[in-house]
Image (tube, rainbow, N blue to C red):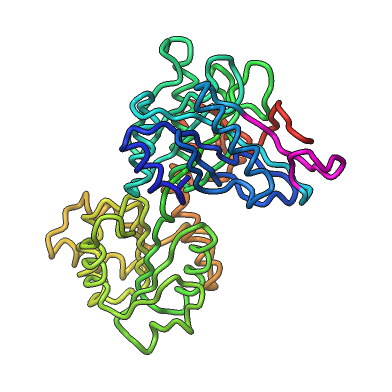
Amino acid sequence: MQDIAEQLHAWHSSGRSFAVATVVGVSGSAPRDPGAALAVDSAGEAIGSVSGGCVEGAVYELCQEAISSGQSVLERFGYSDEDAFAVGLTCGGILDVFVQPITPGADPALDAGITYIASGTPVALARVIDGRAGLLGATVAVTADSHHGSLSPAPTTTGALERAAVAEARALLDAGRTGRLVLGLDGRPCDEAGQGTVTFFVESYVPAPRMIVFGAIDFAAAVVRIGKFLGYRVTVCDARPVFATARRFPDADEVVVDWPHRYLDSQLALPDGKAGIDGRTVLCVLTHDAKFDIPLLERALRLPVGYVGAMGSRRTHRDRNARLREVGLTDAEISRLRSPIGLDIGARTPEETAVSVAAEIVAHRRGGSCLPLSAGQGPIHHDLSRVDEPATPEAPVAKSHAA
């Protein structure tokens, strides 16, 4: 929906009803990924695409029917070679499409979700696409610290389900991921859809989180590569132009020549809608040079970022902390600094060091203990307090069309 968000917001703001068809599952060589969407308004105008042309006509009709009936529907489009007149995918794939009517002002979750998406505010929409009668199309819009909408007017019967859906959706939002989620009515995750389960499609609308690597040293290239692997948009910043070059860091999204603290200040001043600094931002300070580190960390440790780590020996760490106190940082602010950066895995090479840094970033973000999983007995996912395991991202659906 993100690629058609501006038009949807315009329809919504004008009070116009419409229906959105979203790809919620693919198999084989289906032409579009989950999250691709086509929308049709009450006047018959269509925007977006779910298949690049194969089934657009049939989906258009489903949208018009949903606007008329007010009912959501889940359809499966499969291979159509055996019947030349069947509606299906000639590429041989399978496409699951969920069609949902939207009336402005009728659903707080959809109202909030469309507004957030259009404004660029990170949000996850968790929509029921299969399961218990009466829940089809029920939606919650989840942000980092709140949620809108409800799965039922009787929360005593679906309270656990809603809490679990919100928690799982928030985890997917934090990771910037989209996928299916199958839960039991008690909120517990299930391996596959079946009797007594509810299937959600969770769409995360969020720019990639940022990793800023300060210090164009040899270890930085490995940290950049693993940062990209984890899904970050990675920037390398160094005040020395001879080292801060795109040729030395081909995997970085951008390489900036500037004093680290000055570049950080510039990111705080970006206009709304630009990818600046937020609670998911990771700052890796690899310079271990006081003239760069202290002005940078003085600012960084007072920002609501996700992680701040600094490279250096134990001696460098002690000296750095003393200097930070001298410039006025409190013990509480200094305690946010992960230094020496990374987990103790015995790393030696730049690549091993990058693994160490990445492991600490993930553990810090997810609340991990940094112990071997074999050493514990409790839930392995620390960020989901009400459920024990993650839901399987893909699960079968019941309906089919032109299989």
The spot of residue 290 in percent (x, y) is 25, 75
Residue at the (38%, 63%) spot, across then down: 340
Residue 235 vertical placement versus 384 (above, below): below
* Residue positioned most to the front: 43
The magenta stretch is: 74-89
Taking the magenta stretch, the answer to whether it contains residue 285 is no
Q: In the drawing, does residue 78 fall left or right of residue 116?
A: right
Residue 312 shows in the view:
no
Vertical side of 224 occupied by 146: above or below: above
* Apparent side of residue 31 relative to residue 79 in the rendered image (left or right): left
Q: Nearer the viewer, residue 226 or 203?
A: 203
**Residue 254, position in %: x, y?**
41, 73
In the displayed structure image, the side of residue 105 where residue 180 appears, left or right: right
Q: Check residue 75 for magenta coloring.
A: yes
Q: Residue at x 49, y 33 (%)?
A: 19
Q: Nearer the viewer, residue 33 or 333?
A: 33
Q: Along the horizontal axis of the image, is 43 left or right of 391?
A: left
Q: Is residue 364 above or below residue 73?
A: below
> Magenta region's main secondary structure?
loop
Of all residues, the one furthest to the right in this rendering is: 82
Q: Is residue 329 above or below residue 103?
A: below
> Where's the C terminus, which quadrant?
top right
Rendering coords of residue 12 (x, y %): 36, 36
Nearer to me, 316 or 23: 23
Q: Position of residue 268 (x, y in %)?
A: 23, 61
In-front residue for pair 11/256:
11
Q: Quadrant of residue 74?
A: top right
